[in-house]
Amino acid sequence: MDDWAVVTGGSRGIGQAVCRLLADKGRRIIVMDRIRPEHDRVDEFVEVDFEQPEAAAATLRAAIGDRRVTRLVHNAGICVPASLQSLTLPDVRREIEISTTSPIALGQVVVPSMKRAGIGRIVTIGSRAALGKQERTGYSAAKAAMTGIVRTWALELGRDGITANVVAPGATRTWMLQAHNEVGGWFERKMNSGIPVGFIAEPEDIAQAVAFFCSDEARFVTGQVLNVCGGTSVNFLEADAAA
């Protein structure tokens, strides 16, 4: 029977890189996203709006049917930069619905399949900003919540062969970063100055960590948060410039 992986936000950026690596390992890929995939490493595309977690979960349940789903990677997210005084509660709710509530709703859909298979890997994409970052109240709250979620799932699901972990990227060269910042411009130079390894990550750098957590070999690693950040989580005084 085919082994299926569900990748949210899998149409481009980090999600696209994750799809490629998992497909290379023989997984069949379901991409859940608002836009069509910009790559060919997908077996099925499901258009969803993660601001509506219950509807997204219902859509996924109908899509997977009786397929053997053993991997869930929740990469979808949104960041609305704003100071405490200027943020709006609707924007905070959007960030939390997409990054926090949605993986819970989707987990409820796929965990029964994982339990039947005797193996499951759940990976959520967090952020170094969960450690604190200016103008990120809603985003930091949504990403920090993932720590409690995966630790709870690690305790509840470990006996069923299911692991749950967070990969927390630092600055990564995604479409969003490039859309708002000139390549080689002053902000990129500022970011580089705060990253100990001296460069911004490519999506594949983050996807490699996700692929490890999704592997059969990662069976003894669960409830963990891995900062894939070029050292910015250590070089904390400079980290605001880098993530």
Image: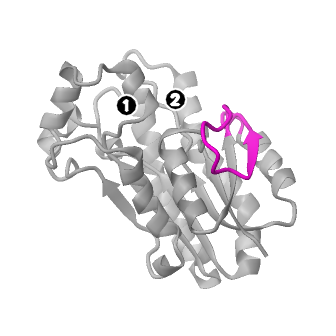
Q: Is residue 197 above or below residue 122?
A: above
> Could you say which quadrant of the image residue 185 lies in?
top left
Check disc 1 and report the residue beneath it: 136
Q: What is the CA distance from the residue labelled 1 to the residue labelled 2?
A: 10 Å
The range drawn in magenta is 33-52
User: Looking at the figure, which quarter contains the C terminus?
Assistant: top left
Classify residue 173 by image quadrant: top left
Question: Could you tell whether 100 is left or right of 64 in the image?
Answer: left
- In the displayed structure, would residue 167 be above or below residue 113? above
Left or right of 236 on screen, residue 169: right
Magenta stretch: includes residue 39: yes
Q: Position of residue 153 (x, y in %)?
A: 56, 68
Q: Earlier in the sequence, mark 1 or mark 2?
A: 2
The residue shown at (51%, 63%) is: 150
Mark 2 sits on what residue? 92
Q: Residue at x 20, y 40 (%)?
A: 239
Whether pointer 1 and pointer 2 mark residues with C-beta atoms closer than 8 Å, the reply is no
Q: Main secondary structure of the magenta part?
A: loop
As rendered, which of 97 and 11 lies closer to the eye? 11
Q: Which residue occupies the extreme top position in the image? A: 86
Residue 151 visible in the snapshot:
no
Between residue 69 and residue 39, name the one nearer to us: 39
Q: Secondary structure at mark 1?
A: loop
Q: Residues within 10 Å of mark 1 (few under 14, many from 20)?
A: many
Q: Amino acid at mark 2?
A: Val
